[in-house]
Image (tube, rainbow, N blue to C red):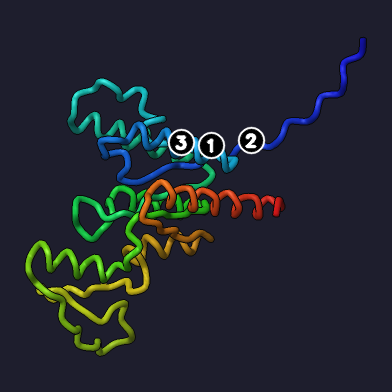
Amino acid sequence: MDRPPTAPPGPAAPLVYLAGDIVFRADALARFDRFRAICRAEGLTGLAPLDGQEDVQGLPPGEATLMAIVAADRALMDRCEAGLFCLDPFRRAADMDPGTAVEIGYMFAQGKPLFGYTADGRDYPAKVEAYMRDAWGAPLRPRAPLALGGASGGMEDADGVLVHSEGMVQNGMTEGFIRLSGGRVLAHPDLDEAFRQAAAALAAHLRAGRGGG
C-alpha cells in the first residue's frame, strides 16, 4: 500500500532570547516556565539564560563561574533570532538591570529585532523622581537650559545630574535601541501579561518580516 505524500515541514519556531532581571528573582524557574509556554502559544521558542548554563550548574560563586555564565549567555544570544527584554526597575532603584541593558546593545548590534516589557509603565523621569524622594528625601529641580543644542530632559537631581529620557520607560539608549530595531516596549501592571503582549507583538513582527502577514 502506497503511503500518502508527506507534507513539507513548516518553518521552525524562531528562537527568542528571554532577558531581564527575571533570572535573579526567587521565582525565576516558574516564571521562565510560564514565559516559555507563552512563547510556544505565539509560535516562538523562548530560551532563558538558564537554558544555556548546564555546564555552570553546581559551580561555586566566583570570577571563573561568572565568566562562564557570561560566555554561555553570549552564545545563547548568538543562536537566537530576536530578544524579549524586561525593563523593570532593578533593586528598588529607577534603572533597569545593567546586564540586560548590555544584552540589548549586543543583540541590536547583531541587527536582531528586540521587544521590551515592563510592569512599571511610568516614564523614566517619574521613576527617578520617586526614587530620589523616597530614598534620599531629595526632590528634583529644573535644569538650566544648555548653551549647545537641545537636552533629553528638563530636570536634574540634587547632585546636578540631568534626569533624561522623558517619554520613555527607561534610559533612552535601551528603549531607543529597541525602537530602532523595529520593536517597542509593552507595559502592563501584571508582568506575565506585559510579557504576553510583547511576545505577541514580536511574533507578529517576525511573521511580517517573513511575508506571513
**Badge 3 amino acid:** Leu
Q: Picture coordinates of residue 172 (x, y %)?
A: 35, 67
**Rendered residue at 27%/39% (across/down):** 25
Asked if residue 65 is positioned above or below residue 122 in the image, the reply reads above
- To which residue does mark 3 refer? 47
User: Left or right: where does residue 4 sit relative to residue 186?
Assistant: right
Earlier-in-chain disc, 3 versus 2: 2
- To which residue does mark 2 refer? 12
Q: Picture coordinates of residue 68 (x, y %)?
A: 30, 31
The residue most toward the left is: 137
Badge 3: few (under 14), some or many (20 or more) residues near its Cα, within 10 Å?
many
Corner quadrant of residue 118: bottom left
Earlier-in-chain disc, 2 versus 1: 2
Asked if residue 68 is positioned above or below residue 94 in the image, the reply reads above
Q: Picture coordinates of residue 203 (x, y %)?
A: 58, 49
Asked if disc 3 and disc 1 are in contact, CB closer than 8 Å, the reply is yes
Q: Secondary structure at mark 2?
A: loop
The residue most toward the top is: 1
- To which residue does mark 1 refer? 45
Corner quadrant of residue 1: top right
Asked if disc 3 and disc 2 are in contact, CB closer than 8 Å, the reply is no
Mark 3–mark 2 Cα distance, whole angstroms, equals 14 Å
Q: Picture coordinates of residue 155 (x, y %)?
A: 22, 79
**Rendered residue at 41%/59% (across/down):** 187
Asked if disc 2 and disc 1 are in contact, CB closer than 8 Å, the reply is yes
User: Left or right: where does residue 158 sit relative to residue 91?
Assistant: left
Q: Quadrant of the C terminus?
A: bottom right
Mark 3–mark 1 Cα distance, whole angstroms, equals 7 Å
**Badge 2 amino acid:** Ala
